[in-house]
Image: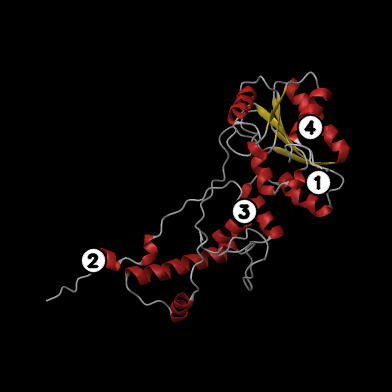
Amino acid sequence: TESTESTDDDDMVEWRHAPHVLAMSATPIPRTLAMCKHGEMALSSIDEKPAGRLPIYTKLLIGPDGIDDAHRAMVEEVQTGGQCYVITPLVNASTADSFERFKSAEVEHKRLVEKFPQIKFGILHGQMNSEEKAAALKAFADGHTQVLVATSVVEVGVDVPNASVIIIEDADRHGVSTLHQLRGRVGRGSRQSKCFLLVGDEAGYPSQQRLRVLERSNNGFHIAESDLRMRGAGDLLGTRQSGSQVSLFHASVATDLFLLEAARRAAAETIARANVRGENLPAPLAIALKDRPALVDLNV
């Protein structure tokens, strides 16, 4: 007679074949944070700084007076043995109307060299070749360069413990997650580090308020929460990473995290009992799973 015994593969539920994915981020984008809260991703948080690290003093500075204050801090830090980053949004000056007011690394480097001849400046941006980038980073890491003028190419992977001041020009051009990552280039040593966010007088009140969250917090998740409230969660099953606020009826992704976590645990336990013990799923859940739309293949 034909055997009725099932194999391990027969008993295995389809979702168990899915690979495990580990997503690591210092500042989760709104869509990622919303997915965590909706149960699509489990969340583990490292909320302690390495030993000896101090919170980074952060200040939003507006207009020409703010630029002067930031440059004074840069000079003082260099004179006491520290190093500094100056971050610009562009590589070269742009003639486009929408970019005319924004500073570029090439022009700012030349201007700073002329204004502060006593300081050794370096430059780093994405249009340099690999050898030039490596040489610029090595000169800064070895202390031969006191101030590095760069674009956001230094956002990740740069570790110079002696760098203790970062000046971010036209900060309103960046998202708060990028700014938090850039701020993380300093504060890696024992010196009290400072971050100056510079914006022009043209920056409106909403832009200024968006940046002030960085003054109030050094915590990446608090910053992501603020970003979520301001920009929206985006599409949980699509590709939009912000906008289109998600409706949760009476629950709020900003304030009701404990309820969402409890609902996620209850759903996981229900599905686990069905898979392990063979219990039937509750009828509404079974119908919802049966009638759910097919997943979108984003690789097409």
Whether tag 2 and tag 1 are in contact, CB under 8 A, the answer is no
Q: Give the mark nearer the N terminus: 2 vs 1.
A: 2
**Vertical relation: 88 (above or below) 289:** above
Marks 3 and 1, Cα distance to the nearest angstrom?
Answer: 29 Å
Left or right of 191? Residue 276 is left
Residue 107 badge = 4
Q: How many marks?
A: 4
Q: Give the mark nearer the N terminus: 1 vs 4.
A: 1
Q: Give the mark nearer the N terminus: 3 vs 4.
A: 3
* Residue topped by disc 3: 29
**Vertical relation: 92 (above or below) 204:** above
Marks 3 and 4, Cα distance to the nearest angstrom?
Answer: 32 Å
Question: Secondary structure under badge 4?
Answer: helix
What's under tag 1, amino acid-wise? Ala
* Label 3 packing within 10 angstroms: few (<14), some (14-19), many (20+): many
* Label 2 packing within 10 angstroms: few (<14), some (14-19), many (20+): few
Looking at this view, is 56 or 154 the one in front? 154
* Residue topped by disc 1: 96
